[in-house]
Image (cartoon, rainbow, N blue to C red):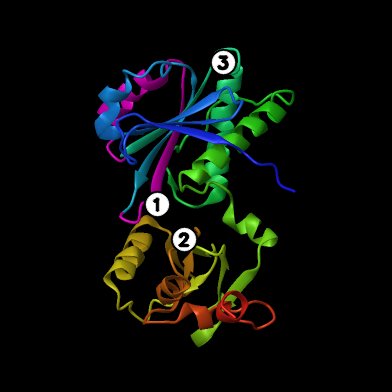
Amino acid sequence: MATSKKLEIIYYNGQPDGIRSVRRHLSTITTYVIPRPLLSEAKKISGITRPGIYYLINENDENKIAQIYIGQTRNGVTRLDDHNRSKDFWNKAIMFLADNKTFSLDMISGLEEYAIIKAHEAKRYKVENSVKPKYEIDEYDLPSIEEVYDEIQFVMATLGYKMNNAKENKEKREVFHTTRNGIQAQGVYNGDKFEVLEDSEIDMSRACPFETLKKQRDTALKNGDIKLIKGKYILTSSIEFATPSGAASFVLGGSVNGWTEWKNKDGKTLDEIYRK
């Protein structure tokens, strides 16, 4: 049986999309979610100048991460002042801060490098860290770094941001596919969202009739999330959709019923598995 986890959340201005802090029961790490316009207000919070790592994210119109930058801080939120002046892309900061005994300088540096590596491996969004930190993770520190990162990944998921490698994770979930019009595409469904996986083909010969999906395709082409490779348009990073039909229409163009389009290896549709 999976272990239960308890999270405590504080909404500092009483708004669900305002400044928040999140803490797991018995953990020494506190997560702070800071919208960029509220950066000055966040500095008034007690304990927010502790060391740790942070994510600067740019959310798109669907409240999903489009761009991300990862850094370390030895003085908490005040580190964000430099980024507020020099980086334009981000609209929210998520900080993971701990007491000095938990995060030594070596631990912070190792955790920063590990998080950057994982972000590149995930291929879910554009990573703004083009330069890898010049730090070698000590083999004795690695287990602690992995443990902290697991907590970061869990908290980020509760905030709606998946950090794991979707392609590797597909082995743990049932994979659905479509081969309509010769297009080879794969995806996974968690009962709520449908995720089209990296390396899926996209039929760009047929336009999407829905403005949101059309815009999402155009953005993916511009950002390099869809690339023309050997005469085929290939998805280079996994993309999550609110519905299976939205995912199918994005892949195939036109208006497609995803509940009957996506099938597992036995030929059963999503409709047969989840609705009947």
Q: Is residue 269 magenta?
A: no
- Residue type highlighted by circle 1: Lys
Mark 2 neighbour class, 10 Å CA radius: few under 14, some 14 to 19, many 20 or more? many
Which tag, 2 or 3, sits closer to the chain's start? 3
Q: What's the residue at 60%, 21% (across, down)? A: 107
Q: Which type of secondary structure does the marked residue at label 1 adopt?
A: loop
Residue under pointer 2: 240
Q: Is residue 128 something one can see in this rendering? A: no
Query: Do the residues bearing badges 2 and 1 touch, measured as CB atoms within 8 Å?
Result: yes
Query: Do the residues bearing badges 1 and 3 touch, measured as CB atoms within 8 Å?
Result: no
- Residue type highlighted by circle 3: Leu
Which tag, 1 or 3, sits closer to the chain's start? 1
State whether residue 63 is above or below residue 71.
below
Q: Please give left or right for residue 12 compared with residue 99 in the image.
A: left
Residue under pointer 3: 105
Q: CA distance from mark 2 to mark 1?
A: 9 Å
Residue 195 percent across, percent down from the top left: 51, 63
Q: Please give left or right for residue 63 compared with residue 127 in the image.
A: left
Q: Which mark's residue is nearer the viewer, 1 or 3? A: 1
Residue under pointer 1: 64
Q: Is residue 62 magenta?
A: yes
Q: What's the residue at 69%, 81% (across, down)? A: 266
Q: CA distance from mark 1 to mark 3?
A: 31 Å
Q: What's the residue at 49%, 58% (across, down)? A: 237
Which tag, 2 or 1, sits closer to the chain's start? 1
Residue 171 percent across, percent down from the top left: 69, 61
Q: Is residue 1 something one can see in this rendering? A: yes
State whether residue 231 is above or below residue 112.
below
Judge by depth and name the residue closer to the eye, 1 or 255: 1
